[in-house]
Image: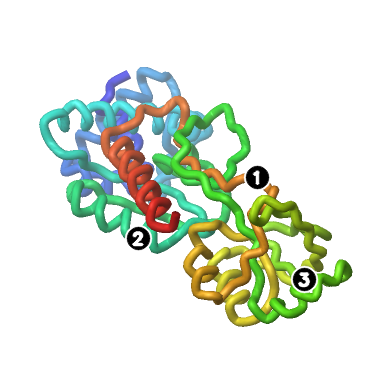
Amino acid sequence: MNMNALQDFISVITHGSFSAASRATMTPKASISRRIRQLEDELQTRLFERTNTGFTLTAEGTLLFERIKPLVNELNDIKTDMMEQTGSPSGKLRISVPPVIAFDTLGKLAARYRALYPLVELELIADSRLVDPIREGFDAVIRVNPMADEEMIGIKIFKETLIFVASPQYREQLALGDPLTELPFISIGTHWKPNQISTVLEGEPRHFNVNTELYISSPFITRSTLISGVGSALLPEALVADDIKAGRLLHLGVSEQPELILWCLYPSRRYVTGRLRAFIDLLKETFSQESSIHH
């Protein structure tokens, strides 16, 4: 199959019409139409049904688009990378990130990435939804403690300890040592509803009875809620270290829950572009620096 014809086919679908594809690619409309007709002849099937308002894809056209779009994009990425061997990365880079990770850190990363690689169009999309990176066109996704997925491979970026913290208003209540003391608890991001939180503080195991009263998806809102005088929660050490030192939060120990591990994942079948490699390197460096600041 002719590579130019396949690229034209994708451009028509992506831009919504033959005319729009012609303008976007600066290719004569007649040339696009001719190559697509030749592609249909070669495949012995119709890819488009022409209508008064434009076109619709046939079932065969839809199948071809789903199969070749990732392949053509990958070939273009390889071509771009080969041309960039003596230059700077360029092109578009789409990354999905969860709201649970530090926005200020990603903001610093985005600013630095832009300064280092001005030819790359970086798009960071914060979404608590688990996107499908292959179907939705993401180069990579950043995830906390992700489930295993055979279609994805990744690099461990950062790990963080969970600290059990509480509002200072419970200081006297906890100091009394009443074993029946029950702390209001905020569950983050899930409907996990524990009855007890176990921690280690200064080498000694501790156990706290809790009653889940709030569910908040964001650790930043949770932190603000605690500082405002309500509840307890398990939060990343880097997020609460300064608050503990300043007395804004009570440190109740290191959680026995698994550590938070941040991964950068990308499709196992997709070529890793220079712009993505540069992003991953900067991601690891940025989170390493943040960790050293807070520790």
Do residues under tags 3 and 2 come within 8 Å of each other at their CB atoms?
no
Q: Residues within 10 Å of mark 3 (few under 14, many from 20)?
A: many
Task: Give the image location of residue 217, x and y in percent.
Answer: 62, 63
In front: 259, or 59?
Answer: 259
Say left or right for 228 vs 108. Answer: right
Q: Residue furthest left?
A: 86
Task: Give the image location of residue 97, x and y in percent.
Answer: 46, 52
Q: Residues within 10 Å of mark 2 (few under 14, many from 20)?
A: few
Give the residue at mark 2: 107
In front: 203, or 39?
Answer: 203
Give the numbered dot on residue 258: 1
Q: Is 200 drawn above or below residue 2 in the view shown?
A: below
Task: Give the image location of residue 237, x and y in percent.
Answer: 54, 57
- Name the front one of labels 3 and 2: 3
Secondary-structure class at tag 1: loop
Q: Amino acid at mark 1?
A: Pro
Give the residue at mark 3: 183
Residue 66 visible to the viewer: no
Residue 99 visible to the viewer: yes
Q: Quadrant of the C terminus?
A: bottom left
